[in-house]
Image: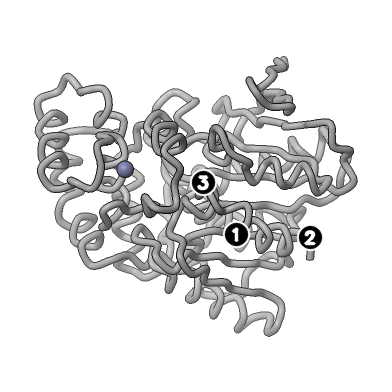
Amino acid sequence: MTTTQVAPGSATHTEVIPFRAGDGMALNLHHVTSSHPVTRGPVLLVHGAGVRADIFRTAGQPTIVDALLAEGWDVWLENWRASIDLPPNRWNLDQAAVHDHPAAVATVLEHTGADTLRALIHCQGSSSFALSAVAGLLPQVDTIVSNAMSLHPVVPRLSAFKLSRVVPLVALAMDYVDPHWGKTAPTGFLQRRMVDAVRLTHRECGSGACRMVSFVYGAGHPALWSHENLSSGSHTWLADEFGPVPLTFFAQMARSVRAGRIVPTGSVPGLPDDPVAGPPRTDARFALVAGRDNLCFLPESQERTYDHLERHAPGRHSVHVVEGYGHLDVFMGRYAPRDTFPLILQELAR
Ligand SMILES: [Zn+2]
């Protein structure tokens, strides 16, 4: 079953196409079209943790989706199990790598009749998608443009401390943390105390949700963008774009940061114990992008993955550290159409 929506104030149409993950979980794809003729193949956009497909479509400004449509791409956005558009669930990267992304790719290829597709992937959408690719589960994906982190998470020292010391304690008391608590006060006692602590320690702006995002996802003030890079409209918009993230994910990321590479939980068959122990089981070309000022995952994350990939296929891949940008302002920055989109478009088209 499909539905069609017309985005207010924009000439794009979004068709929501449900599909089933490998374990039966109900997920969906947003197929975005516009008046621009489709002259290129399908491109799949994969969001990060605790957001949704629309994180790539900042309200009130030209987005990477608009830029892709203008270049003739057939644009598909995946709502995988970490999406806040889906019922909260205690997901991990293994489930996404084995169950979600291969099914999403198969669905896009089935609908388009294409043999291959290209992917633009961000943060935990990137780590799980890259994990899937190097495990040999995405043979139809020939080009992967990744932002922020893929196989080697390197985080600021404060984040490493929070992951190793604070997450285990929080996990004793709650199953999820939710940046949206910064906007709509939570009812639980511990949740309220967490919001109070963030209010005291994060004074960088007046948005409770923006400050909670920084507490949950990194070590900066703010962590995922610089305020100078955002319009006031997108700063307001993002407050409703973040939702619950399960502690199961943070526990896996804590182990991965300690190991210096993504560590599968072992809960889902089909993944190697160490995804960077041998050559990647994919022919995809990777273009790895990192904002120089990223305070969620340091740029060294992408540089390490580049070194790994390059060892097995010298000269095939690329890495780009973008000055003046952080984590998500690569997509939602007010000047991103000028500063970062050309690089993304160029790497997808290469
Ligand atoms: Zn803010």
Disc nearest the viewer among 2 and 1? 1
Q: Position of residue 270 (x, y in %)?
A: 56, 52
Q: Which mark is residue 206?
A: none
Using a 10 Å C-alpha cutoff, classify the residue at mark 3 as few (fewer than 14 neighbours), some (14 to 19) or many (20 or more).
many
Mark 1 is on which residue type? Thr
Local secondary structure at mark 2? helix
Q: Position of residue 193 (x, y in %)?
A: 9, 33
Q: Quadrant of the C terminus?
A: bottom right
Residue nearest the viewer, comparing 329 with 47: 329
Colouring mode (rainbow / by chain / secondary structure / one colour) = one colour
Lower position in the chain sequence, tag 2 or tag 1? 1
Which disc number belongs to residue 340?
Answer: 1
Q: Nearer the viewer, residue 331 or 190?
A: 331
Q: Residue at x 57, y 72 (%)?
A: 320
Residue at the spot of label 3: 332
49, 258: nearer the viewer: 49
Cα distance, mark 3 to mark 1? 10 Å
**115 on left or right of 324:** right
Question: Which secondary structure, mark 3?
Answer: helix
Q: Secondary structure at mark 1?
A: loop
Nearer to us in this view, 290 or 119: 290
Residue 262 falls in image quadrant: bottom left
**Residue type of the residue flagged with mark 2:** Ala
Q: Residue at x 57, y 41 (%)?
A: 56
Q: Considering only vertical position in the picture, is 143 above or below 247?
A: below
Q: Which residue is mark 2?
A: 349
